[in-house]
Amino acid sequence: MKKCLILVLTFIIFTILVFPCQATFSEPSVDPRFPKEIAQSALPKLLDFGRGKCIPCKAMAPILKELSEEYKDRVIIKIIEIDQEPGLTRANRIRLIPTQIFFDAKNQELSRHEGFMSKEDIKKVFAKMGVQ
């Protein structure tokens, strides 16, 4: 009986030492620079970081809405409220608002602009990105 117990304990210790890693079933990691709902999208992205009380941010909101409709299914345009998304704000190293960050389909940052950006200027960046 004693030999059997020693054998079982030896087997358990051996198993723990030889196979220390356990399989985990966690979610795939999500890029911290993007909201979860768009992180995996294969479309180019424009993230606009601002605050609802900011005058240039308020002026850009209708422009971004128009562009979002105009470029639907070609570019994801997302307004990020910095007060509501401090993690995204930190991950994207936002210093001033509004800040627009343009990403390609592989989530590589292509361009960054701080301050108000006109509709025409945004369209120029889209054109440089190859988005028509």
Image (spheres, grey):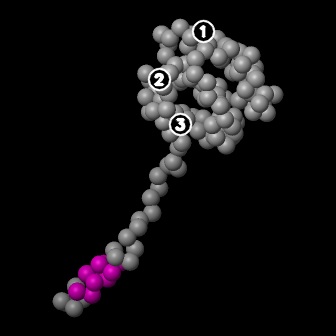
Mark-to-mark CA distance, 3 and 1:
24 Å
Q: Position of residue 63 (x, y in %)?
A: 67, 13
Label 2: few (<14), some or many (≥20) within 10 Å?
some
Magenta stretch holds residue 7: yes
Residue 22 sits in quarter:
bottom left
Label 3 sits on residue: 33
Q: Position of residue 111 (x, y in %)?
A: 65, 31
Magenta stretch holds residue 109: no
Which amino acid lies under the numbered mark 3 shown in the image of this protein?
Answer: Arg
Mark 1 or mark 2, which is nearer the start of the sequence?
Answer: 1
- Residue at x 43%, y 21% (from the top left corner): 83
Mark 3 or mark 2, which is nearer the start of the sequence?
Answer: 3
- In terms of secondary structure, where does tag 2 sit? loop
Label 1 sits on residue: 59
Which amino acid lies under the numbered mark 2 shown in the image of this protein?
Answer: Ile
Q: Position of residue 120 (x, y in %)?
A: 74, 16
Q: Which residues are magenta?
A: 6-15
Label 2 sits on residue: 82
44 lies left or right of 55: right
Which amino acid lies under the numbered mark 1 shown in the image of this protein?
Answer: Ala
